[in-house]
Image (cartoon, rainbow, N blue to C red):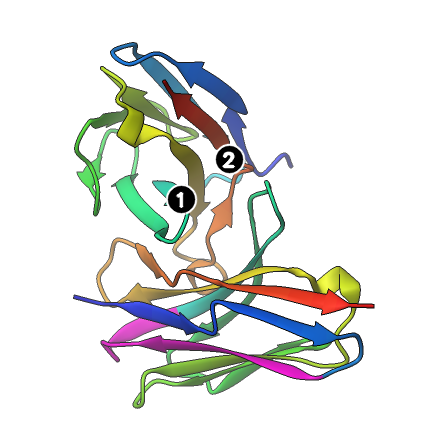
């Protein structure tokens, strides 16, 4: 059974710092991995999707990497801003044809001005 | 495009009452999903559908039923609500032929069962 873990559960950094969020999964037979952002009381916004054949994806100040063999993904946020404060969730899609996602519990990030 | 919409946004039920949550998407997606989000538990899949007229159980299906009579709509029903069903419910959809199956989420429905 696929399990997804995100460490740390919470993170507080001063504005301007570069930071890394971690996601690990137990079954390396994944189709893709998706990083989401969730603001308090809101829905999920997709940030980056990495296909199983890819090593990384970039969007602006965000860079996500994937090491399928070791069951790890990282989300790198450069030059953090207070507006980056949110909960970040990673989710993996298995190799079945159902498209189901298995989510980690999230990392809540606070960027202090 | 409105994307994925959910109705209602908030609801308070008494134990034993029933209700239906509506999810609608205007992206012509084949696949649709219902998740629940609880503190410390992350998002867990309740039911899903891979096409009009089809439904299947997810990780936590007990106490819920679903229907997909139209491609654009996915309904989640609670026949007899229990306090354990207090949660935030999210609907999602995806098109398997685009962008590696990126899932798009609705804004959520906050349900409290007293």
Q: What is the chain letter for disc 1?
A: B
Q: What is the chain letter for disc 2?
A: B
At x 27%, y 18%, the residue is B81
Dot label at residue B11: none
Left or right of residue A2: residue A35: right
As rendered, which of A112 and B110 lies closer to the eye? Answer: A112
State whether residue B91 appears in this view. yes
Q: Secondary structure at mark 1?
A: strand
At x 32%, y 68%, the residue is A4
Is the C-beta separation of discs 1 and 2 under 8 Å? Answer: yes
Report the magenta residues as a range. Answer: A18-32
On screen, residue B3 above or below A97: above
Whole-angstrom CA distance, mark 1 to mark 2, is: 9 Å
Which residue is under mark 1?
B37
What is the residue that sits farthest to the right in this orientation? Answer: A113
At x 29%, y 9%, the residue is B17
- Image quarter hosting the C terminus of chain B: top left
Q: Is residue B32 magenta?
A: no
State whether residue B31 appears in this view. no
Q: Is residue A24 magenta?
A: yes
As rendered, which of B47 and A41 lies closer to the eye? Answer: A41
Instruction: Find residue B53 and report its image quarter.
Output: top left
Which residue is under mark 2?
B108
Q: Find residue B31 and report its horizontal and vertical position in percent.
A: 35, 44
- Image quarter hosting the N terminus of chain B: top right
Instruction: Find residue A82 and report its image quarter.
Output: bottom right
Q: Find residue A62 and report its horizontal and vertical position in percent.
A: 66, 76
Q: Main secondary structure of the magenta part?
A: strand
């Amino acid at each position: 059974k696929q399990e997804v873990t995100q460490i740390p559960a919470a993170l507080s950094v001063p504005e301007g710092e570069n930071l890394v969020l971690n996601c690990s999964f137990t079954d390396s037979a994944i189709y893709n991995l998706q990083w989401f952002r969730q603001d308090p009381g809101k829905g999920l916004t997709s940030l980056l999707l990495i296909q199983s054949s890819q090593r990384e994806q970039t969007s602006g100040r965000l860079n996500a990497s994937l090491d399928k063999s070791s069951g790890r993904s990282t989300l790198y946020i450069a030059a953090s801003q207070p507006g980056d404060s949110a909960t970040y969730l990673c989710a993996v899609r298995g190799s079945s044809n159902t498209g189901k996602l298995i989510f980690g519990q999230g990392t809540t990030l606070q960027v202090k001005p | 495009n409105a994307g994925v919409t959910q109705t209602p946004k908030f609801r308070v039920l008494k134990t034993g009452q029933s209700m239906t949550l509506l999810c609608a998407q205007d992206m012509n997606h084949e696949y649709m999903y219902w998740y629940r989000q609880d503190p410390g538990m992350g998002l867990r899949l309740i039911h899903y559908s891979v096409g009009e007229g089809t439904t299947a159980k997810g990780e936590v299906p007990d106490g819920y039923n679903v229907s997909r009579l139209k491609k654009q709509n996915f309904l989640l029903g609670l026949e007899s609500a229990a306090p354990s069903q207090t949660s935030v419910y999210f609907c999602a959809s995806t098109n398997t032929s685009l962008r590696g199956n990126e899932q798009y989420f609705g804004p959520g429905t906050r349900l409290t069962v007293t």
